Amino acid sequence: MTEKQLIEGCKNGERLAQKELYDTYSRRMMGVCLRYVNDRETARDLLQDGFVKVFTSMDSYSGIGSFEGWMRKIFVNCALEYLRKSDVLRESTDLDNMAELIHPDCSAISDMSAEELMELVRELPAGFRMVFNLFAIEGYSHKEISEMLNITESTSRSQFTRAKQLLQRRINALY
C-alpha cells in the first residue's frame, strides 16, 4: 500500500491498514520514545499510546506536510505528557550545582559514533534529556518548549545548557 492508501485505510478503521502503518513506522517511533525515556518498557507503553492517538486522530491529518512528521509530533507529545505527569523538570532543576562548562575536546566528539552519542543523551537526567531532545533534535525553539512544558524560556535555556555541559563532561571522560 502507498502512504496515501494507508492513511485512507486507517481513517476508515481498516485493521490491515493499521497493522501495516504500525509495522512501517513502529521502529522509528520507538526511537522517538526512547529519546525521552530511559526505560524500554515505558517506551513501549508510550509507543502503544502514541499509535492509539494516531489511529484516533487520523481525521485531523490534513495531508499537508509530512505524515511521518505529523506522527512524530504525536509521539513527542505523548512522551512529554508522561514526563510532565512524572514531574521530571522538578527533579532536574535541583542539579544547579553543576560545574561550569569545560572546554570541549572536539576530537573526542569526532571519535564517537552516532549510537554512542545517543546513548549518552539517553543517560541524561529526564528533564535535561527532554529539553535537549526538543531543542537539538526536534528543532523546537525555547519559546515553543516553554509553552509545551509550561516553564519559562530561561528555564528551557538553562536546562539545555546544563544538558550540553553534562554531555561534554561525559564525552571528555570517555575519550
Image (cartoon, rainbow, N blue to C red):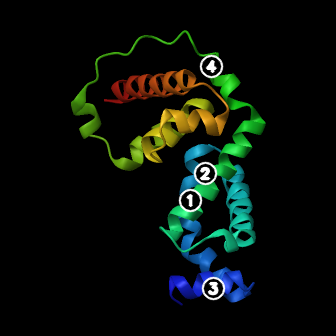
Identified by mark 1, the residue type is Arg
- Closer to the chain start, of discs 4 and 3, is 3
Please say whether residue 123 is visible from this viewpoint.
no
User: Label 3 vs label 1: CA separation?
Assistant: 19 Å
- Is there a contact, CB below 8 Å, between mark 4 and mark 3? no
Neighbourhood count class around disc 4 (C-alpha, 10 Å): few under 14, some 14–19, many 20 upward: some
Looking at the rendered image, the disc whose residue lies closer to the viewer, 3 or 2, is 3
Count of numbered labels shown in the rendering: 4
- Find disc 1 in the rendering and name its residue: 72
Say which quadrant the N terminus sits in.
bottom right
Say which quadrant the C terminus sits in.
top left
Helix or strand or loop: what does disc 1 sit on? helix
- Is there a contact, CB below 8 Å, between mark 2 and mark 1? yes
The disc placed on residue 8 is 3
Which residue occupies 46% across, 37% down?
120
Q: Whole-percent x and y of residue 9?
A: 66, 87
